[in-house]
Amino acid sequence: MSFEALKRDSDKRWLDLTTGTKPWIRVSSVMCCGTSLESEEIVSVIANYIEKNKMLINIDTVGCHGICYAGPIIDILYKGQPRIFWGNVTKDNVVKILDSYIKKGEVLTDNLLGSLGERSIDGIKKIDDLPGINLQNRIALRNSGNIAFNDIFQYIANGGFEGLHKAVTKMSSDEVISEVKNSGLRGRGGAAFPTGLKWSFMSNSKGVKYILCNCEEGDPGAYNDKGILESDPYTLIEGMAIAGYATKSTNGYVFIRHGHDGPIERTKEAINQAYENGLLGKNIFGSDFSFDIEVSLTGDSYVAGEETALMESIEGKSARPRSRPPFPAAYGVWGKPSTINNVKSLAYVSEIIRNGSEWFKSIGTESSSGTAIVCLSGDILNPGMYEVEMGISIKDVVEKIGGGIPNGRKLKMLQTGGPLGGVLGPDSLKVKIDFDEMAKAGAILGSGGIIIVDDRTCAVDLTKSLVAFCQYESCGKCFPCRLGMTHLLEIVEKISKGKGNLNDLDLMNKIGKNMQAGSLCGHGQLGYNPISSALKHFQSDFESCMDGNCPTGSCNERQIVFPENTRPSSWQTIKEN
Amino acid sequence: MSALKNINNEYILDILENQDHTTVTILSSLLSVQDGIGFLPKNAIKVVADFVNVTTNDVWGVASYYLNFRFDPPGKHTIEICWGPSCHVNGASKLQSSVLEKFKLKNQGDTSDGKFTLKFNTCLGACPQAPMISINHKLSGKMNSLKLLKMLDKLK
Ligand SMILES: Cc1cc2nc3c(=O)[nH]c(=O)nc-3n(C[C@H](O)[C@H](O)[C@H](O)COP(=O)(O)O)c2cc1C
Ligand code: SF4
Ligand code: FES
Ligand code: FES
């Protein structure tokens, strides 16, 4: 089928869904809000209900609305009325909601979130007034919560694959790269490297070349990559295909940690549907561009998310980083030229091509264009995954969107950009969400995780959990990181137990400097960050703990039991000394 | 349960041949065996080595690197508790200590009756619902010790 015909067909189906006579129920279900609560059970309760009542109803499972605190969420579109949303739905109250709305036209006010649509309904507030909805500008997440994760026609009806079609039929590879360069898109995986520039490094050699999409997402506190794959895997697939066209690549891998069944299964299904409709595979849109994508699974290893370790892992080996040069653009996976991007970076690409780079550049700030998908968790009233324009202050994100700290407590720390990122204090609320501004403040935006911590937690306690993570996840290839992390953890543990003295701070600083200078990859190079940033803002917590007076008592109360790392390393020998 | 149990070679080979991975590697093969059997039996190392055409040394290297692989049968139920920072500040260590006490364990591992395997995970990927646990791969959020112990008691 030609793309035009596919589009006509999709539009017709969409029109049927949205303006037809049947109610359309959408149940939001992703790992976070859904499967971890009970949305799967809710879907089957609704299915039973439909069957029992012999009703003609469309039901779809959709992705995330971002407002995790309200999950599981369902909404109904019926009889030309605006979409009506209910939150914190359970398998016990869902039938009541359906019964009263579909049978009697009455909107049950228990659990009601509000309505969405241009028109409003008397007596029902609009969902746009909810914290976290009106300050968002959803680009990468534009379809998330709105389309079924497993229906490519719904994606196409909403502008899907227009970007790829435009690129392949109307633009040269170089033009696509210039467009992405001009958009100012920077990598969302951690290092914020300009995406278009990275693509332009790709070797011009003929033959097999790879686009690698990084969804390892091991950072505790970040779940937006998995969120995209579960909510709208098509936008990633389209972005990868455009990246493939731009770099004249032939193959793509989506790299996901095993066991995350939601993202894995949904991505695989979306890839299959794209093949069935000629949007992947040979001669896409009748051009001479062919592109294949497959899913590659990795085992439990945080460092597998590092770009060269990822390549080792795809090849089926231990995920230990390679030394560079050679760089991936010349010698990547299976020795072939490879470009690696994060899920979010690629998820923007289709809209950038479809709407033009000027449009994207007009959103956000001078140095960081577009949006950031922030994941709020920890001590926050409204945890969730929110797509906000770059340039918004952290204060607005925490207070307006996140609803602030619950139970009248005070904000103490913000942990951003994953365990290797850094810890900020309350004085950084004025800092803007922006790659450069956050780096200046001593933290990174990284992949967008923000863990909010209130005044019940001692800085030493939080630092200990971050350092323990970094120690546990060291791949063990180089000793400054392997031994350094272990030594740092020992010292932080000692301090948290009321021992230690000021010399220990100097010692940690020395170890940190050595790790930075001598480690092969970012894990060891940045491994001292959690400690140095915590010391910058909260040295007094460290000093009190050394005197046996943990300022909040959390060091004594929360005794984490660290699992032992079974990777071959010499940490046991240090412990015994 | 520390002995490396053997499972019929043919059975393992069958898993390897039918693995749901497009590109077959040492890692994809080990993941399939563990998914299929629950652990890596000792003879699987050799079977995988022959199947992928590498040495047993290569296979051991990969199997010992990724922390999800285990070499003896897991308990009947696998309980995972997240100790990542979002869960930590929301009380993960309390969950750890109450389950450790119930299971009479000092750290992650298997209970002596073979009923439970306890694992500590660095992030279960649903941090907004912290503290997170999973029971037999099903995630549950906003957990507390009382609720968790009740859930464990219900497992047969
Ligand atoms: C220890 C370590 C872990 C990493 N983990 C991830 C990850 O889980 N996901 C990711 O996209 N990037 C991760 N990165 C960054 C990648 O190496 C790489 O820079 C990124 O995927 C490039 O994509 P981008 O240019 O789109 O940002 C990690 C880096 C290091 C040093
Ligand atoms: S710095 Fe750490 S994680 Fe990176 S290669 Fe060295 S040991 Fe491995
Ligand atoms: S509700 Fe969407 S990520 Fe949690
Ligand atoms: S930190 Fe516990 S689920 Fe992410």
Image (cartoon, coloured by chain):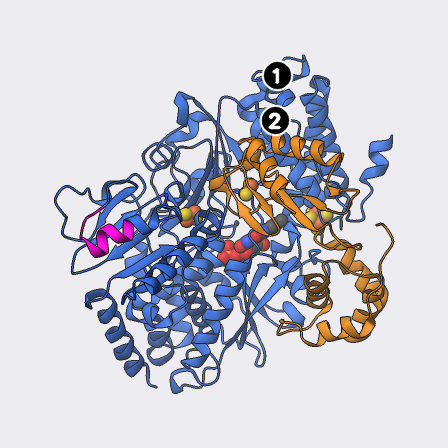
Chain colours: A blue, B orange
| Quadrant showing the N terminus of chain A | bottom left
Alpha-carbon distance for marks 2 and 1? 9 Å
Q: Residue B100, located in which quarter of the rendered image?
A: top right
Labels 2 and 1 touching (C-beta < 8 A):
yes
The residue located at (85%, 57%) in the rendering is B4
Can residue A565 be seen in this snapshot? Answer: yes
Examine the rendering and report whether any part of residue A365 can be seen: no
Q: Quadrant of residue B31?
A: bottom right
Mark 2 secondary-structure assignment: helix
Q: Which mark is residue A550?
A: 1
Foreground pick, A25 / A131? A25
The mark found on residue A461 in the picture is 2
First to last magenta residue range: A97-107
Which x, y percent locates residue B131?
54, 37
Above or below residue B89? Residue A376 is below
Magenta-span inclusion, residue A102: yes
Image vertical order of residue A210 relative to residue A433, above or below:
below
Q: Amino acid at mark 2?
A: Asp
